Amino acid sequence: MTKDRVLIFDTTLRDGEQSPGATMTHEEKLEIAELLDEMGVDIIEAGFPIASEGDFRAVSEISQRSASATICGLARANYKDIDRCWEAVKSARSPRIHTFIGTSPLHRAIPNLDMDQMAERIHDTVTHARNLCDNVQWSPMDATRTETDYLCRVVEIAIKAGATTINIPDTVGYTAPRESADLIRMLLNRVPGADSIVFATHCHNDLGMATANALAAVEGGARQIECTINGLGERAGNTALEEVVMALKVRGDIMPYATGIDTTKIMNISRRVATVSGFPVQFNKAIVGKNAFAHESGIHQDGMLKNAETFEIMRPTDIGLADTSLVMGKHSGRAALRAKLKELGFELADNQLNDVFVRFKDLADRKKEVYDDDLIALVRQNDAVADYLRLKDLRVVCGTRGPQTAELVLEIDGVDKSVTAKGDGPVDATFNAVKALFKHKARLQLYQVNAVTEGTDAQATVSVRLEEGGHIATGQSADTDTVVASAKAYINALNRLIVRRERSAPGEDIKGVSYKDVD
Ligand code: KIV
Ligand code: ZN
């Protein structure tokens, strides 16, 4: 059976990043775009260029760096948005403009356009986009709640004006699989010229049906799926890339559609997106959840030992999970560490490897077994950014009745400073101590703790996201002591803010207005 090709359009950096709290830094966006490109995503929606200077810069730089994927930017239905979008994507090897307008009765009321006025706007804006770029995607936002006749009319107008892809968004996650398939089928049957363009499906997960709806739309004739890594996105999120891709791979017998995705890269990018967005993956999430391949019950383990297919419909290695998770002990050497990290997808320069090796030895001294996840956490600790601030010592006194007390020694620009601070819990006391020694105005946007592995000696990975004057920095750290990991992550985020601030205002005294250490 020959397989029809389904294009994978990833919108992690636009719809995913739009999710409140999921903001990524510029460097993080570039890194995610590179991973998406390497994984074989066909189209990367890199951002919404008119939304902010930061979005514009990210879309432009991703466009310049793109190796194989088409790079797309989002624009509302007006010339200014479309022009800005084109400015940002035009340097891509293969650029695309994606323009949209809400076509359902509720959405038409917002710009206060009647049906005819909106139809004219669609004609004019798609024509304008097409005059700039020969790859134009148009979306009738809230398509699944738009009157059928009107939807056919506007889709026809967009095709005649030059749209090459028509995306049918289920903006509020309202549709159901059969309806999703029927809608695309109906458009293909009724709209003149529909067979000359690609139909895309863009589903939200409010009723938990985003993956099913996207796959049903493909059955109905859609040949582009819009999705995000880990299903990141506003409210309940978007269709998860890993779910549709693996569903098509595993059930190719009943869904004969091929994608260009190298599925062995899924796990790495999933972890990366979880880390940089600060949105952890739920343990029982399909494909990339921590428990997705865990077989704990006796019956399952017995069956698995005899034949893995008893309970597994796909292999962990299909998504890039190493076969075995128990890796190394304290006698393992540098070469073994390098080889293991390579297997996990990390190629480190010598100095980086030395740094990780020191931390690995330290961890192996404190922890009986060092697992893959422990190593990944060690590599991801980004405390090599800038060492303006360094944790020298931390002692926390906890009691059942607070407040807790933190005694902190912090090296600030090479000089040790110490303080004792109180707080509502050990982490609060520690952060107060950091603030007392290094005064700053950064606001805490996110504080998140996860246990890397099982057991009471498990490492905790902590993410701290800070915002100051529009700059955002995320610091991460891992340690068997949660409070130490928290302190390091916080200090790491501050170091990153300092670097960021230095880059945007070179030469400005970092001990000046916002950053001030105590004498
Ligand atoms: O959900 C939606 O309708 C969108 C559009 C901008 C395509 O994200
Ligand atoms: Zn959306």
Image (cartoon, grey):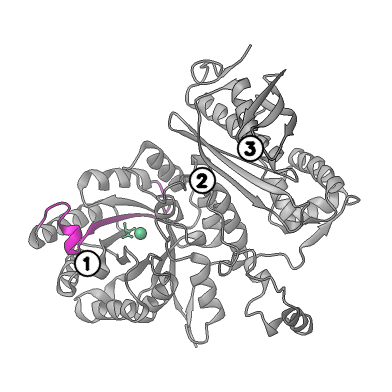
Q: State the mark number for residue 425.
A: 3
Instruction: Find numbered disc 2 in the image and state the secondary structure of the residue it sits on.
Output: helix
- Residue occupying image coordinates x 67% and y 74%: 315
Magenta segment includes 177: no
**On the image, which quarter does residue 470 sit in?**
top left
Q: Single out the mark in the foreground, 1 or 2.
A: 2
Point out the quarter of the image occupied by ligand 1. bottom left
Q: Residues within 10 Å of mark 1 (few under 14, many from 20)?
A: many
**Residue on which disc 1 sits:** 159
User: In which quadrant will I find the C terminus?
Assistant: top right
**Upstream in sequence: badge 3 or badge 2:** 2
Q: In this view, does 40 lie to the left or right of 311?
A: left
**CB-based contact (under 8 Å), mark 1 and mark 2:** no
Q: In this view, does 28 lie above or below 294?
A: above
**On the image, which quarter does residue 225 sit in?**
bottom left
**Residue on which disc 2 sits:** 30
- Amino acid type at mark 2: Leu
Instruction: Find numbered disc 1 in the image and state the secondary structure of the residue it sits on.
Output: helix
Q: In this view, does 501 lie to the left or right of 404?
A: left
Q: Single out the mark in the foreground, 3 or 1.
A: 3
Q: In this view, does 327 lie above or below 29?
A: below
